[in-house]
Amino acid sequence: MMDVFPNFIKKLPKVSIKLEGCEAYLLQSEKQQILFFKFNKDVELPEHNHESQWEIVLEGEVNVWIDGKKKKYTKGDRFYIPSKTPHKAKIYKGYSSIAIFNQKDRYKRKK
């Protein structure tokens, strides 16, 4: 199976992220960040909140609880998390996505 991201995306700066089995590449703008996520393991993301997030699923599946309501998303689905809304997720191995955060400093580059 071909890797979901082409080489020019994999040449973007990697993100410093504390989720085992997660690879993420960063495209930075003045006010937002675009992240290209790929998960090689199942991951449970605890409840948290931040500025708004829009995400589209490229491969795999994820269960997302937004403000206490659970929904499953698969390839081609997209979801939106409003600013400061509590959310958590169960991300399954093989999941990849593109996420846009309306926050310029949500993630830092890996050193």
Image: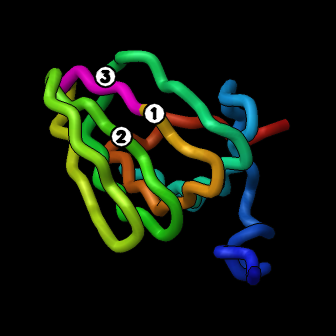
- Residue at screen point 24% across, 54% down: 79
Judge by depth and name the residue closer to the eye, 11 or 71: 71
Residue type at the position of mark 2: Asn
- Classify residue 96 as left or right of residue 18: left
Q: Can you say whether 29 is above or below 64 in the image?
A: below
> Which region is colored magenta?
85-89
Quarter of the picture containing the N terminus is: bottom right
Which secondary structure type mostly characterizes the magenta part of the structure? strand
Q: Determine whether label 1 and label 3 are within 8 Å by CB.
A: no
State the CA–CA distance, disc 1 to disc 2: 5 Å
Residue type at the position of mark 3: Asn
State the CA–CA distance, disc 3 to disc 2: 16 Å
Is residue 86 in the magenta section? yes
Q: Residue furthest right?
A: 111
Instruction: Tell me the SS state at disc 3.
Output: loop
- Residue 63: where, in percent of width, then height? 36, 40
- Residue 104: where, in percent of width, then height? 43, 43
Disc number for residue 90 = 1
Instruction: Tell me the SS state at disc 2.
Output: strand
Q: Determine whether label 1 and label 2 are within 8 Å by CB.
A: yes
Instruction: Tell me the SS state at disc 1.
Output: strand
Q: Which residue is mark 3?
A: 49
- Classify residue 22 as left or right of residue 63: right
Q: Can you say whether 72 is above or below 83 in the image?
A: below
- Whichever of labels 1 and 3 marks the residue nearer the N terminus, that label is 3
- Residue at screen point 26% across, 30% down: 65
Q: Which residue is mark 2?
A: 63
